[in-house]
Image (tube, grey):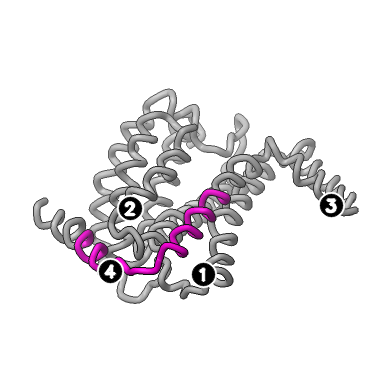
């Protein structure tokens, strides 16, 4: 454990702090403001229950047919449940990925590779992520027996007797994309955008909003997000990549959904 801590925490902290550069205040301010706006938009405009703004906007610009179609898809359609999940996932793709990418490209004018999306040279880190899964998955199994867990998952609420195909598996694909987007936002855009100015402290700056998006989850999961933010953030700095973290996140999330369905008799 001492060797792991030195390799994946102490050495990462010293290296990251050694890379702090002068003149990076502008970048840090832009990253923080962008993150603030994105989280605000996701929270208040990214829920299907609040989607009236979308069809009202379409009405306002003369796209009445599109407005009616969107309204029907999210309210009266037989597939309204999965359509609502599509709206939810799309909002997160825009807030977590599209807006930050535009800021990186046209405002910061940085290389995307500097924001945790590189793949080359990251294969060697698979063992540490496999160790994390070996620790986390048994905890998820134990947590799945709680009433709060079973009431929360999966986000796509299946009707009694509904088959898993096609909508549940369609939802899992959307869910996975959302987690990859989330990893890019927190462990890519925020973390790598702030590290040149704040060094290793950027991990803890990222943890705060990451924990706050878990306020609607059961309390143990919100507490776990603090630990996950620290571990995944540190590893993202070590590897320079978010992809193993995204894969681990997706694995845990899909497992939790399947455990919930198993407890409720769908599997």
Query: Which residue is at 23% across, 67% downward?
Result: 18
Instruction: Return the x and y of residue 191 as percentages of the image width and height.
Output: 38, 58
* Mark 1 or mark 3, earlier in chain: 3
Q: CA distance from mark 4 to mark 3?
A: 50 Å
Magenta stretch, overall SS: helix
Mark 1 vs mark 3, foreground winner is: 1
Q: CA distance from mark 4 to mark 2?
A: 14 Å
* Mark 4 or mark 2, earlier in chain: 4
Query: Which residue is at 54% across, 61% downward?
Result: 100
Q: CA distance from mark 1 to mark 3?
A: 35 Å
Q: In this picture, which residue range is highlighted in magenta?
A: 12-38
Instruction: Return the x and y of residue 21 as percentages of the image width and height.
Output: 32, 69
Q: Which residue is mark 4?
A: 19
Compared with residue 122, is residue 55 higher up or lower down, i.e. above or below? above
Q: CA distance from mark 3 to mark 2?
A: 42 Å
Compared with residue 199, is residue 79 higher up or lower down, i.e. above or below? above
Mark 4 vs mark 3, foreground winner is: 4
Q: CA distance from mark 1 to mark 2?
A: 21 Å
Q: Which residue is mark 1?
A: 108
Kindly indicate whether the residue at mark 2 contacts the one at mark 4 (C-beta within 8 angstroms): no
Secondary structure of the residue carrying numbered label 2: helix
Q: Which mark is residue 265?
A: none
Q: Is residue 100 left or right of residue 23?
A: right
Query: Which residue is at 28% across, 57% downward?
Result: 200
Mark 4 vs mark 2, foreground winner is: 4
Inspect the magenta stretch and tell me whether residue 119 lies in it: no
């Amino acid at each position: 454990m001492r060797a792991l801590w030195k390799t994946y925490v102490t050495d990462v902290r010293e290296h990251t702090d050694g890379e702090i550069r002068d003149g990076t205040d502008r970048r840090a301010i832009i990253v923080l403001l962008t993150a603030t706006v994105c989280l605000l938009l996701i929270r208040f405009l990214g829920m299907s229950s609040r989607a009236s703004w979308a069809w009202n906007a379409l009405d306002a610009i003369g796209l009445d047919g599109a407005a009616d179609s969107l309204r029907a898809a999210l309210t009266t359609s037989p597939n309204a449940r999965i359509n609502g999940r599509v709206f939810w996932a799309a909002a997160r793709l825009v807030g977590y990925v599209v807006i930050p990418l535009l800021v990186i490209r046209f405002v910061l004018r940085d290389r995307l590779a500097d924001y945790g999306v590189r793949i080359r040279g990251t294969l060697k880190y698979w063992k540490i992520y496999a160790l994390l899964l070996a620790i986390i998955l048994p905890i998820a199994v134990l947590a799945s027996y709680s009433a709060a867990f079973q009431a929360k998952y999966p986000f796509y609420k299946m009707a009694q007797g509904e088959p898993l195909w096609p909508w549940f598996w369609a939802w899992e694909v959307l869910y996975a994309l959302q987690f990859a987007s989330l990893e890019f936002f927190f462990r890519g855009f925020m973390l790598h955008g702030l590290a040149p100015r704040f060094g290793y402290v950027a991990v803890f700056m990222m943890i705060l909003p990451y924990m706050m998006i878990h306020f609607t989850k059961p309390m143990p999961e919100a507490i776990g997000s603090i630990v996950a933010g620290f571990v995944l953030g540190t590893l993202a700095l070590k590897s320079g990549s978010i992809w193993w973290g995204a894969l681990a996140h997706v694995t845990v999330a899909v497992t939790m959904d399947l455990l919930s369905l198993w407890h409720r008799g769908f599997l």
